Amino acid sequence: MGSGDGRAGSGYDRDRFQRAYDTVLAKWPADRESTAVGTDFGTVYVHSCGPRDAPPLLLLPGGGATSPSWYAQVADLARSRRVHAVDLIGDPGRSEPSADRPVRTVADLTAWVDATLDGLGVTGPVALGGHSYGGWIALHHALRAPARAERLFLLDPTQCFAGFRPAYLLHALPMLLRPAPHRVRAFLEWETGGAALDPDWLTLQEAAAGFPSVKPVTGPRPEPAALRALDVPVLLLLAENSRAHDTRRVAARAGEVLPRVETEVVRGVSHHALPHAAPPGLGRRLSDFLSGVPG
């Protein structure tokens, strides 16, 4: 939800953003560690927690979101996984894109994920989890590097199995064209149906308005043939009240093309309320899936 043009919006306040970021990050478990990983695409900021010898899990936030936004799920996930949550390169957060090698294609995104994992010392298969745009990245990475994908969970992923609803894009347009905190709030209140949101998280989303981000990599949905060939367990959790896309259409399409998918609808939650404001038990459901426990 950043400006996407490489310039800070008129309402962007860097100090306010950093304070809001730290406030949400403080909700993470006490054993959290932060690392700046150098890659050819820039410096990637990563928050990690959980046993060092546990199987790795890489978390990718939605577009315009940040790694601290996983705070409501990370404690459950870190019981059995070494969790690494990243700030997307060129998006709001503390990662810093390279001026010499920008991320411009899906192949670049896959290489960026690989470089980040290499920098973290993760050499074998890894579980991937993504929300929204982060789910799109995770799915493309699994398709392009299947030997490195152990398991995959997708939280209301966008542009993977169906397109955006026109109304969603229409409501997002004012915020995208002229980023400002009040426009971010208005959009989130509309998409979530006025649901109660964590005020600290909402402040962080507002503070990200006008962040000097770069144009995100987008593209067509994955090819059906490639999805049918994906031999990786996938957990697809869809927001019942999502206004981003048609939940039933996404579920039906995923069931048609993914050979090893479990699909569930998370009741009473919208697209932007995931993952931070999901109903209790989501973290345990994700952990069970990662451990191979049937849903």
Image (spheres, rainbow, N blue to C red):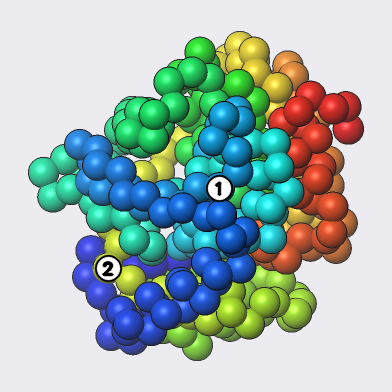
Examine the rendered structure and indicate whether residue 63 appears above or below residue 174. Answer: above
Q: Nearer the viewer, residue 295 or 24?
A: 24
Residue 260 position by quadrant: top right
SS at badge 1: strand
Amino acid marked by disc 2: Pro
Which sits earlier in the primary sequence, circle 1 or circle 2? 1
In which quadrant is the C terminus drawn? top right
* Left/right of residue 77 with respect to residue 285 in the rendered view: left
Q: Is residue 244 visible?
A: no
Residue at the disc numbered 1: 49
Examine the rendered structure and indicate whether residue 290 appears above or below residue 275. Answer: above
Q: Position of residue 119 (x, y in %)?
A: 33, 34
Residue at the disc numbered 2: 212
Q: Is residue 95 visible?
A: yes
Q: Position of residue 16 (x, y in %)?
A: 38, 84
- Structural crowding at the residue carrying mark 2, measured as other residues with C-alpha within 10 Å and reported as few (<14), some (14–19) or many (≥20): many
| Mark 1 and mark 2: Cα distance apart in space | 28 Å
Examine the rendered structure and indicate whether residue 32 appears above or below residue 141. Answer: below
The residue that appears at 88% across and 27% down in the rendered structure is 294
Q: Nearer the viewer, residue 172 or 1?
A: 1
SS at badge 2: loop
